[in-house]
């Protein structure tokens, strides 16, 4: 064969298609639903991690700024989870980045 088709036949005879074709063929509502779930779950997990880190740092000998930064970053991630569940996934992504950056900055003061 001289040309390349939409799918390639492997040596075993199986038909392989690119994964990008599946993404383009996917239902837009399903893609949006998956983005909302991803933003909400990621935000919730980062919020829980921030709260756990805040509680651990609060019980230690760290300055008060450190657990406060973790708690504030967790609050920002919780807000991102809420916005993500409401469909504001771009804003949620940027809030997740900001929340993690606040937690990392607070960790630098330890």
Image (cartoon, grey):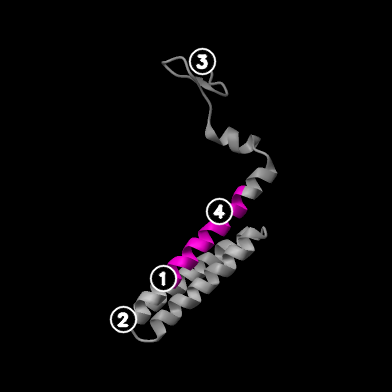
Which badge, 1 or 2, comes first in the chain's sequence?
1
Main SS, magenta region, reads: helix
Dot 4 and dot 3 residues touching (CB under 8 Å): no
Q: Which residue is mark 4?
A: 38
Task: Indicate the position of residue 12 as horizontal and vertical percent values.
Answer: 42, 15
Dot 2 and dot 3 residues touching (CB under 8 Å): no
Q: Mark 1: give few (<14), some (14-19) or many (20+) Cα within 10 Å.
A: some
Task: Indicate the position of residue 15 as horizontal and vertical percent values.
Answer: 51, 20
Which badge, 2 or 3, comes first in the chain's sequence?
3
Badge 1 element: helix
Looking at the image, residue 51 sits to the left or right of residue 38; the answer is left
Residue 4 included in the magenta stretch of the image: no
Q: Is residue 2 visible?
A: yes
What quarter of the picture does the C terminus occupy?
Answer: bottom left
Nearer the observer: mark 2 or 3; the answer is 2
Quadrant for residue 58, please give it: bottom left
What range of the chain is rendered magenta? 34-52
Q: Mark 4: give few (<14), some (14-19) or many (20+) Cα within 10 Å.
A: some
Which badge, 2 or 4, comes first in the chain's sequence?
4
């Amino acid at each position: 064969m001289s040309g390349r088709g939409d799918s390639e036949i492997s040596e075993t005879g199986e038909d392989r298609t690119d994964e990008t074709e599946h993404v383009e063929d996917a239902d837009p509502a399903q893609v949006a639903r998956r983005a909302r779930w991803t933003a909400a779950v990621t935000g919730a997990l980062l919020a829980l991690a921030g709260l756990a880190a805040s509680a651990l740092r609060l019980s230690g000998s760290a300055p008060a700024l450190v657990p406060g930064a973790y708690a504030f970053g967790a609050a920002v991630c919780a807000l991102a989870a809420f916005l993500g569940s409401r469909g504001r996934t771009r804003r949620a992504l940027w809030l997740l980045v900001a929340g993690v950056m606040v937690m990392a900055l607070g960790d630098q003061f330890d």
